[in-house]
Amino acid sequence: MLFALCAALGFAGSAVFAKMGMSRISPPFATAVLIIPAALVTLSLAFIFHWSIISGLSGGIFLWFLLIGFINYPGGRLMNNISINAIGPSKSAIIVSTSPIFAAIFAVAFAGESLNIYIALGTLAIIFGVILVVTDR
């Protein structure tokens, strides 16, 4: 639980600090400043500690992971920075927190998972909460 709280604080802090930093630079440049060092550290650690797994991947699987990495990491971070700059960190964080809805949709559509009452109720709760926050009611 402590690690989850630290992660939440880290994500919240990064959104606020990104907004402060983007007062002087554009979201695309801020994204580059954020992801290049992080990617270098992450790739280094992955190759150091998991080389045997990485070297055992087939070319097709490696390309899928590469594609996911380019969509999620720079693409997601860029869209997040643009939204932070446009609507502020608090509203942006709420909208980004809708990711479980999309995860559930993709899991059912592509991974063969089944929709149950808990996922449906959780999805509705997230949608209702986001509507309340972004409409300022």
Image (cartoon, rainbow, N blue to C red):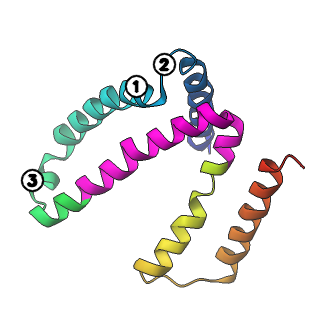
Q: Quadrant of residue 85?
A: top right
Magenta residues span: 65-94
Q: In this image, 96 relative to 134: left or right?
A: left
The residue indicated by pointer 3 is: 55
Whole-percent x, y for residue 53 in the image: 16, 55
Distance, label 1 to label 3, CA atoms, is: 33 Å
Q: In this image, 13 relative to 67: left or right?
A: right
Q: Nearer the viewer, mark 1 or mark 3?
A: 1
At 42% from the left and 31% from the top, the residue drawn is: 28
Q: Nearer the viewer, residue 118 or 64?
A: 64
Distance, label 1 to label 2, CA atoms, is: 7 Å
Marks 1 and 2: CB-CB under 8 Å?
A: yes
Do we see residue 60 in this rendering? Answer: yes
Q: Is residue 135 above or below residue 28?
A: below
> Under tag 1, what secondary structure?
helix
> Under tag 2, what secondary structure?
loop
| Amino acid carrying mark 2 in the image | Ile
The residue indicated by pointer 2 is: 25
| Amino acid carrying mark 3 in the image | Ser
User: Few, some or many C-alpha atoms within 10 Å of disc 2 (few <14, some 14-19, many ≥20)?
Assistant: few
Q: In this image, 132 relative to 37: left or right?
A: right
> Under tag 3, what secondary structure?
helix
| Amino acid carrying mark 1 in the image | Phe
Q: Which mark is residue 29?
A: 1
At 41% from the left and 78% from the top, the residue drawn is: 110
Q: Is residue 7 above or below residue 121?
A: above
